[in-house]
Amino acid sequence: MKKIFIMIILLAGSYALLAQVKTFNACTAEDVFKLLKGDSLVVKCDSVYAITSERFHNYELMRLTLQKNNSLLFGTITQMKQNYEKRIDQLNKDYSDMKSLYVKCDENSSGYLKCDTRSLK
């Protein structure tokens, strides 16, 4: 009877210990698990970092701030790209205008040279 009573106590105690063990199979960078005091964790990943909730919230705040700054930076880069493309279009237009003026100038000069050559003959 004593042996059965001791066995029941051991089984109940081991069951209580098993209830606190948590096993997670997910091992990605985005996995966040909340564990409470007295909980046990079985790690099946290569490595795990455990941080306090306060530090987690600080890291989360930094991540959100960086994400916001990155979106502002992305918007600035997009604006700079648009300005650059506008400038290239303007330079291409200026080049076309200068080329057409040069062609007109060349035609006029050729016409004057022909007239001068005829008048000299």
Image (cartoon, helix red, strand yellow):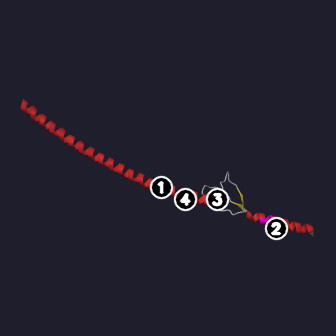
Q: Which residues are magenta?
A: 12-16
Q: Residue furthest right?
A: 1
Q: Residue furthest top?
A: 121
Neighbor class of circle 1 (other Cα within 10 Å; few <14, some 14-19, many 20+) is few
Q: Earlier in the sequence, mark 2 or mark 3?
A: 2
The residue where tag 1 is placed is: 69
Which percent across, then down, holds residue 100? 22, 43
Which percent across, then down, holds residue 99? 24, 42
Observer-nearest of 107 and 73: 73
Q: Dot 4: what SS?
A: helix
Kind of residue at badge 4 = Leu
Image quarter where the N terminus lies is bottom right
Q: Which mark is residue 41?
A: none
Q: Earlier in the sequence, mark 1 or mark 4?
A: 4
Kind of residue at badge 2 = Ala
Which percent across, then down, holds residue 65? 51, 57
Neighbor class of circle 2 (other Cα within 10 Å; few <14, some 14-19, many 20+) is few
Which-is-in-front pick, marks 2 and 3?
A: 3
Which percent across, then down, holds residue 4? 90, 68
Task: Write the residue at 6% across / 32% down.
Answer: 119
Q: Dot 3: what SS?
A: loop
The residue where tag 2 is placed is: 12
CB of mark 2 within 8 Å of CB of mark 3?
no
Q: Which mark is residue 52?
A: 3
Image quarter where the C terminus lies is top left
Q: CA distance from mark 2 to mark 3?
A: 31 Å
Q: CA distance from mark 1 to mark 3?
A: 26 Å
Q: Earlier in the sequence, mark 4 or mark 2?
A: 2
Task: Write the residue at 35% across / 51% down.
Answer: 83
